[in-house]
Amino acid sequence: MGLMGSLYIGTSGLQTSQNALNTVAHNLANANTPGYTRQQILLSDKQYNTISVNHRAISNQQTGLGVTYAKVRQVRDYFLDQTYRKQSGRTAFYEESYDAIVEVETLLRELDGKAFKESLNNLWVSIQELAKDPGSAVTQGTLVQCASQFISKAGAVSQGLKNYQDNLNLQVAKDVNRINEIGEQIYDLNLQILNIEVGGIESANDLKDTREALLDELSQLVNISYHYDADGCAMVKIEGHTFVNRAMSYEIGMTQDANTGFYTPFWLYDARRTEMADGSTSWDIGGAKVFNLTRTISSELDTDVGGLKAKLLARGDHRANYTDLNPDTYNDLVSQSIIMNIQAEFDNLIHMIVTKINGVLASASDPATGYLMDGADPIRLFQKKADKGYGEDLTPGKEDTLYTTDNIIINPDLVKAPTKLGFTKGEGSKDYDLAKALSEAFDEEAYVLNPNVTSTANFLGYYDNMVSQIGNLGYVFKSIYQYQVATVNSTEESRQQVVGVSDDEELSNMIRFQNAYNASSRYINVIDEMLEHIINTLGV
């Protein structure tokens, strides 16, 4: 190659070193930018010109055309990214689950500064005092007053659980909307990256950083899997269902229950849509639900990943009551929902206390003498709310329809005149047997928390067992959450060692490329001096 051609070699060195320095500067400028991935320069030689071919020689005589700035690549570890996103999603699941437990504990232990158990104990103490002197107007009034406080506190707990369900429901809607936004953004970024890199000249690394940050955020909301196709487009799945591909981003829709207002996420393009006569839209989402919430929660099955799923599980799909403790349906519908499980067990406690006290009173009533009778019906301490006043639908055998504050009140007549209970028989004797029967009803150890529990307890023990169950579950969730946080932090540290910018390394690269730039500059100067010497010599 002649001297004039040699100038191209020096020029390639200058251009390549300058571009490399620009990349180093870009790394240093973004060293503290969240989500930034370190960029690495790949250099390669240009094509070689063949001067002569000698089959006897080891190689042909060739001369190089210099160096080229081949590629700027992102330095990422695909497997570390996958591990981080899986563990991050699992951490979010247990964080949301633990938060739900904390909320339940708060509702049970602190209501207007007093724990619910205090009202339960007060009811028990009032029955004990009644057993000492059943004919006293004071003990009868105390019983009615404590029963009223008990129902009021139970209503506060029940309403608090419902409010928390509603709060979780709003969070579900917010998360679904955010997931759809992320899907659209990833799809748009795929197109932008493809348009930039299709020519094989430029690399859209900053756009890829934005896409990776979106995948990090998405992994905390739902269980995702993903890969990159041959053109670098991200193909994303949620719970095994295609979410983003090269063609589109598949939207997640939400149906709303008419009674509870609860949202159910479903795949919009997989559901059947029917336009109703009134202009509304009906969706058949039987096979299009995003989550199968009846599956056992297990790390081995990867069913414990994603904050959205945790919120849906904690919220449940309806307002639970004691009838949800049916052994045939409990494990499928209720057991894995934190709020629904507590609603059902708590409601069962209220139901059992109410029906037991009413049942004891009814067993001692006497239509012939009118003792403990309210007209033709046995007098009841607790009544069911009715549409048109109180006292309706209270025929014997209907007591199993009573549950929590949705339809329980204290007998209005007893609130006005507690002495209507009487506890005094026709001949004037005090009914100690009835008072004792009420006391024994509290001590009877015949109640279990749910179909999966075999140990029995009395009313106070039942509540203690329920609180202990919540505490134990909270301890488990907190332990797993703390372990997951440590795992995520450790994985993120390993990931940052790969993707993070090292100032020392970049400064070292800066010196290296500065020296390469200076060397190329001196090379050009030498060629320039040689050309000048030849031209001046020939000119003489």
Image (cartoon, rainbow, N blue to C red):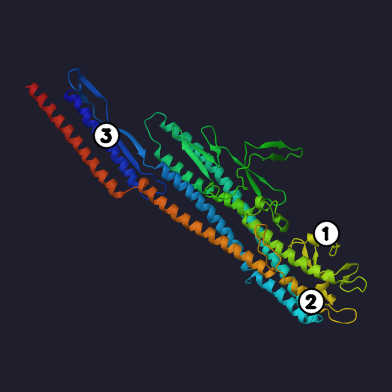
Q: Residue furthest right?
A: 368
Residue at image coords 59%, 58%: 100
Residue at image coords 64%, 64%: 466
Secondary structure beneath dot 3 equals helix
Secondary structure beneath dot 1 equals loop
Mark 1 or mark 2, whichever is nearer to me: 2
Question: Of the residues shown, which amino acid type is indicated by label 2?
Answer: Ala
Residue 480: x, y in percent? 50, 56
Residue on which disc 3 sits: 15
Image quarter where the N terminus lies is top left
Question: Of the residues shown, which amino acid type is indicated by label 1?
Answer: Asp
Q: Is residue 482 visible?
A: yes
Secondary structure beneath dot 2 equals helix
Question: Of the residues shown, which amino acid type is indicated by label 3?
Answer: Gln
Residue 251: x, y in percent? 59, 39
Residue 84: x, y in percent? 45, 48
